[in-house]
Amino acid sequence: MASRCVLQLKAAAAILALMALAASAQACGDAPRLLVLCALAALAPGWVVWHALVRLAPSATQVAASDPVPLRSSADALALEARLEHAPVALFLIEARGEVAPLNANARQFLAPGRVLDRSKLFAQLAAQPAQGRALLAFDTERGLERAMVALSALTVQGKPQRVAALLPVESELESETLNAWRQLVQVLTHEIMNSLTPVASLSSTAQGMLLELQPQLEGEAAAGLAMDLTMALDAIARRATSLADFVGSYRSLSGMLEPRPEQIDLEALFARLALLVEPAWQVRGGELRMLVEPGAPVLVADPGQIEQALINLLKNALEATAGMAAPSATVHARLVRGARLRIEVSDNGPGVPEELLPHIFTPFFTTRKGGRGIGLALVRQLVHGNGGTVRHVRPVTGGARFVLSF
């Protein structure tokens, strides 16, 4: 810093000397010799000024460091825009006033017809999220309730504070992990319970046989009565052990389901077989079962037996839900929806599913029906998911229950 000041003073002094010599040369007028002397005298201060300017001039590194970052070329800007447009997450811009706008193709697809039912509700959820925060959001779609992870970051653009939200659907992943967890739990429970029940049933049957052999040797009314009581007690234990074993065995279908054997399924033929199996039960009660396949419905590639079982379980639930109604009805409707997806809807005109029970209807062992085992809908979800589809409950405007299978 001191050397720069010395150079600046030398340069200033040299410039003053040059100015003085210039004034002297002007005063000399027509004296050539004096003009030559002034020119020669100006060489020294001129060299000092040049030397000082060279020393004070910034280096190339300093110039590069001090220059502002150049703007991206148009090609770079277009490439960056293309990357954002095709990012695998939905990006939303949240202004300081809470206004939300989509930033890329995934975000616009989120808002397209057939996806989010209430855009304003989703925007309010996004705007309410704190900066740098992460959360799990739930929103209604035509396929039912879905969940997505949201992460936000804050930034300032042209002096205006903004937030960018990244939304990633995780419903399928969460459903898959939940199914795997329940499958493992059911497998462990059934294995351990069956290991305990088998010896109980065997020992009670053995004890019954030993008691029957000893009965002829028992004397007296009291001994005979005691033998009868023991026989009845052992018989009750054996019956309950056998019944409980059958009950636990029914849950093995959740953990030991066979791998799907996919093939092309003719939906009209599938619905015709389904009607032969299920329709008589509806006719006996004076009800109506409608099976509809819209023209242009895509071919379903799945395990026909497993899909048929899933639909039978849903129609069985519909039949039980409409018990006691004067004109029960159910509809199975297959059609093509946006994105070249197949949608099969199973709906009825019953009382529907209470709001507080919706989060639990696909949970194994959960039931509200007397004598129910709680595996019907859990098995439906596992069968549909194993064939690459999803099943959701959607509350129809007209009431009743409606389950949507999407492939």
Image (cartoon, grey):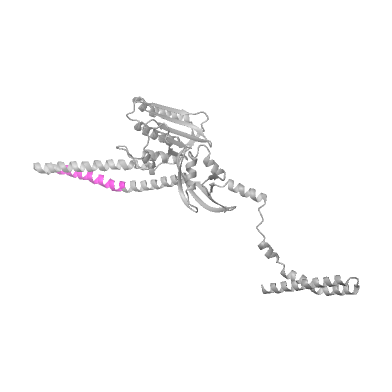
Residue furthest out toward the left: 220
Q: Residue 368 location, x and y as percent?
A: 32, 38
**From the viewer's perspective, is 9 left or right of 97?**
right
Residue 101: image quadrant is top right
Q: Residue 109 location, x and y as percent?
A: 54, 41
Question: Is 109 included in the stretch rendered in magenta?
Answer: no
Q: Residue 30 location, x and y as percent?
A: 91, 71
Q: How many marks?
A: 0
**From the viewer's perspective, is 213 left or right of 126?**
left
Question: Is 202 included in the stretch rendered in magenta?
Answer: yes
Quadrant (top left/top right/bottom left/bottom right) for the N terminus:
bottom right
Residue furthest out toward the front: 27
Is residue 260 visible in the rendered image? The answer is no
Q: Residue 268 location, x and y as percent?
A: 47, 28
In the depicted structure, whether residue 75 falls above or below residue 16: above
**From the viewer's perspective, is 260 left or right of 207?**
right
Identity of the residue drawn at 45% across and 48% down: 136
Front in this rendered view, residue 353 or 296: 353
Magenta stretch: dominant secondary structure: helix
Q: Magenta residues? A: 193-214
Front in this rendered view, residue 58 or 288: 58
Is residue 330 visible in the rendered image? The answer is yes
Identity of the residue drawn at 50% across and 44% down: 123
